[in-house]
Image (cartoon, rainbow, N blue to C red):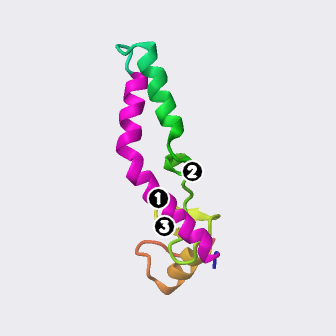
Amino acid sequence: MAKLSMINREAKRARIVQQYAARRAALKEVIRNPANTDEQRREAQRKLQMQPRDASPSRLHNRCRLTGRPHGFYRKFGLGRNKLREATMRGDVPGLRKGSW
């Protein structure tokens, strides 16, 4: 089980990313648009840099829904490898079973 503080920190980051998503998209569009002047672009870059670091989606990290484990995460199931194996052995994941060859 991951530390509760790490799980909460990740949840807080997700909330902040969602909160600033529209503003970030608008600023990035101003920067990308070739019709804008250089001054407008610089101002948009400055505003983008003034936003909190955690507003960037690249700072999010996937974690297991059950344990909060950050490594060995399977996106398709939202679980870490340990819990995915346990769920598979119980038969909770349809269409998935333990390999044997």
The disc label shown at residue 14, or none: 1
**Which corner quadrant of the image does residue 28 belong to?**
top left
Amino acid carrying mark 1 in the image:
Ala
Please provide percent x and percent y for residue 57: 49, 48
How many labels were placed on the picture? 3
> Given this view, does label 1 or label 3 mark the residue nearer the observer?
1
> Could you say whether the residue bearing mark 1 is in a helix, strand or loop?
helix
The disc label shown at residue 41, or none: none
Residue at (46, 83) in percent of width and height: 91
Residue at (58, 72) in percent of width and height: 68
**How far apart are the alpha carbons under marks 2 and 1?**
9 Å
Residue ID for mark 2: 59
Q: Main secondary structure of the magenta part?
A: helix
Which one is in front, 25 or 66? 25
Residue 94 drawn above or below residue 23: below
Q: Is residue 29 left or right of residue 54?
A: left
Residue at (56, 82) in percent of width and height: 86
Q: Residues within 10 Å of mark 1 (few under 14, many from 20)?
A: some
Q: Is residue 72 among the parts visible in the rendering?
A: yes
